[in-house]
Image (tube, grey):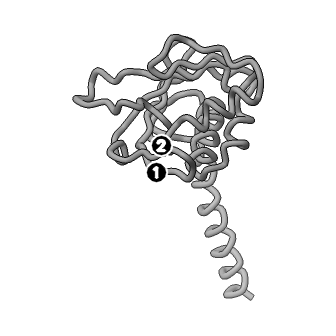
């Protein structure tokens, strides 16, 4: 009876320990709000996978975006989809910090399916400042990383 109980306890312990890492999915370095990090991570993962429609659903309507341009107000889903399609790179979220109302996310750029090509940007880092409101991206603003010697022309095109 004891070997069976021990086997059961061992199996339960393995499940419990395995589950500990699953909540870390939304946790990244930097200590930003986990709910904001979750929205940003899902958006980046969907865009990196080439699912522009799913990534676009993460945006509020209207939304404000700024990627090396004056701020643009996206007023319908087609605008949001066009914006997301215009981003030539995919990205992996590596860090997120809070600065006032913004969550500043750092990404490592990757290729992604779609019309754009990340090219020389692959492996570079890029930063984007997000405002997350009611679980949606209300603002997406490219951040120039003054701590990094180089910045890609496309910015944090995640």
Tell me residue 154's x, y (percent).
Answer: 41, 32
Instruction: Give whichever of discs 1 and 2 has the lower sequence position.
Output: 2
- Asked if marks 1 and 2 touch (Cβ < 8 Å), the reply is yes
Compare residues 126 and 111 and report the one nearer the observer. Answer: 111
Residue at the left extreme of this rendering:
149
Which is nearer the eye, 134 or 108? 108
Residue 26 sits in which quadrant?
top right
Instruction: Residue 15 in the image: state x and y as whole percent.
Output: 66, 67
Q: Quadrant of the N terminus?
A: bottom right
- Residue bearing mark 1: 111
Of residues 135 and 11, the one drawn nearer to the viewer in this rendering:
135
Query: Residue 53: x and y, percent?
Result: 72, 42
Specify few, some or many for label 2: CA neighbours under 10 Å numbering under 14, 14-19, or 20 or more.
many
Label drawn at residue 124: none
Q: Quadrant of residue 39?
A: top right
Disc ID at residue 89: 2
Q: Relative to 72, say whether 33 is above or below.
A: below
Distance between mark 1 and mark 2 Cα atoms:
5 Å
Where 157 sits versus 16, above or below? above
Q: Dot 2: what SS?
A: loop
Q: Is residue 122 left or right of residue 19?
A: left
- Residue at the image position 59 percent from the left and 27 percent from the top: 33
Asked if residue 143 lies left or right of residue 80, the reply is: left
Assess disc 1: are there few (<14), some (14-19) or many (≥20) residues with their C-alpha within 10 Å of its C-alpha.
many
Q: Is residue 34 left or right of residue 133?
A: left
- The spot of residue 50 in percent (x, y) is 61, 50
The image quadrant that residue 18 belongs to is bottom right
Residue at 63% x, 75% y is: 10
């Amino acid at each position: 009876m004891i070997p069976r109980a021990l086997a059961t306890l061992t199996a339960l312990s393995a499940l419990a320990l395995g589950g500990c890492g699953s909540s870390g999915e939304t946790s990244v370095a930097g200590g930003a709000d986990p709910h904001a990090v979750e929205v940003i991570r899902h958006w980046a993962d969907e865009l990196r996978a080439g699912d522009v429609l799913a990534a676009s659903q993460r945006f509020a309507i209207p939304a404000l975006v700024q990627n090396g341009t004056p701020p643009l107000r996206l007023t319908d889903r087609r605008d949001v989809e066009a914006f997301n399609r215009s981003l030539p790179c995919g990205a992996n979220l590596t860090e997120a910090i809070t600065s006032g109302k913004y969550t500043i996310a750092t990404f490592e750029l990757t290729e992604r399916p779609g019309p754009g090509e990340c090219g020389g940007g692959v492996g570079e880092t890029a930063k984007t400042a997000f405002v997350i409101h009611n679980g949606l991206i209300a603002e997406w603003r490219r951040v120039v990383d003054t701590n990094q010697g180089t910045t890609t022309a496309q910015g944090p095109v995640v």
